Amino acid sequence: MLGFHRESDTKRFSDGEFKRINPDLQFSAEFQRVTIALWAWGQFTSRMPTRAWFPTYIYHEPLQPKGLQRFNIELADECRNLRDYDAAGRKWSLTNYPGGYTSYASLNQMHKFSSTFGALERKLAAHVRRFSDQLDMDLRKRTVFLTDLWVNIMPEHAAHSLHLHPLSFISGTYYVTTPAGCPGLKFEDPRLSKFMAAPPKTTKAKPANRPHITYPAKAGHVILFESWLRHEVAANRTTAERISISFNYNWS
C-alpha cells in the first residue's frame, strides 16, 4: 500500500506541518513517514473507483529512542534465570514449545513480581495507548490493563506454530535478544479461509495484497497487533538464543 504514494505528496509536509496536524503526538521519524505515506495514499485512492476497507493494523516501533542496551541485558539475564528456576515451565515447554522454553503456562505475570519486567510494563503503556487510538477504539472512561506477560527463549531449531491470543484485544512482543539471521514474526491474512475460489496472488503482488507478511525480529523494538490476528515464528536457524517477551492487554 505504501508503495503507491507519490514522492511529491510526501515532500509537501515539513516537520512543522506534521505537528500542526497532530500537535499532541510525539512520533518517531519512521512513524511520521508512514503516516504521511498513508495520507498520500488516501489522496490518491480518493480519485480511484476502488478503495481499501477493513485494514489490518500492525504497530512496530522502538520501545524508546535510546538507552535500551543495559535494560535488555538485565532482561536477558532475568529471562535465563527464570528458565533455570521454572521447572513447571520447562516441563510444559517439552510438549507445547518443543526445543525451547516459555513461561506462558507457569509464570505469566512477571510484571507483578520483578521490577525489571515492571519497568517494561510502564514503557509499553504509551505504545498500547497510541495503537488503540489509531484503531479508533473508544476507551473513554475505560481502563486498559496488562493481563499476561511471559518469556520466550528459542534456541536453535525451536519454532512457534500458528496461533492467536484469545481473551484479549491487543497482544504484542518485545524483542530482548535477536541474533543475526533469527526468524521474525509472520502474520497471516485473517481472510484466508474465506477466499473461496480466488486465484493465487502474482509474484509481484503489493505487500498489502499478499497472504502473509513477516516483520523482522529486532532487539529493542515492540510489535503490537489485534489479538485475533494469527501469527507464527519459524524455526530458529541460528546457534544463538532468540529471546522475546510476549504480552496481552484487556480493558474494563
Image: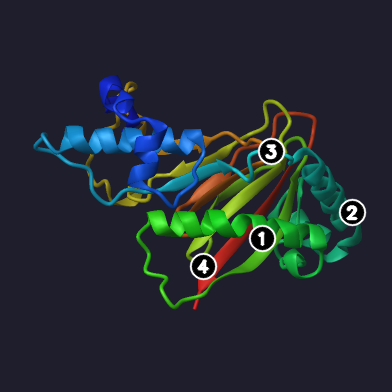
Name which residue lies at 76% across and 45% down: 99
Mark 1: few/some/many CA within 10 Å (<14, 14-19, 20+): few
> Which three-letter amino acid code belongs to the residue tagged 3?
Lys
- Answer above or below: position of 108 versus 37: below
* Residue at the spot 67% in from the left edge and 26% down from the top edge: 181
Q: Going from the N terminus, do you reach mark 4 or mark 1 first? A: 1
The answer to whether marks 3 and 4 mark residues whose Cβ atoms lie closer than 8 Å is no
Left or right: residue 99 compared with residue 22: right
Q: Which label's residue is closer to the chain start, 4 or 2? A: 2
Give the CA separation, mark 3 to mark 4.
30 Å
Q: How is the image coloured?
A: rainbow
> Mark 3: which secondary structure?
loop
Q: Earlier in the sequence, mark 3 or mark 4?
A: 3
Amino acid at dot 2: Asn
Q: Disc 4 designates what residue? A: 168
Label 2 vs 3, first from the N-terminus: 3
Q: Is residue 95 above or below residue 71?
A: below
Q: Amino acid at mark 4?
A: Ser
Q: Tell me if residue 210 comes above or below residue 21 in the rendering.
A: above
Q: For residue 81, which numbered disc appears in the image?
A: 2
Q: CA distance from mark 4 to mark 1?
A: 19 Å
**Which of marks 3 and 1 precedes in the sequence?**
3
Label 1 sits on what residue type?
Arg
Q: Which residue is mark 1?
A: 122
Q: CA distance from mark 2 to mark 1?
A: 22 Å
For the question of whether residue 224 can be seen, the reply is yes
Give the image quarter of residue 50: top left
**Disc 2 packing (10 Å; few <14; some 14–19; many ≥20):** few
Numbered mark located on residue 150 in the image: none
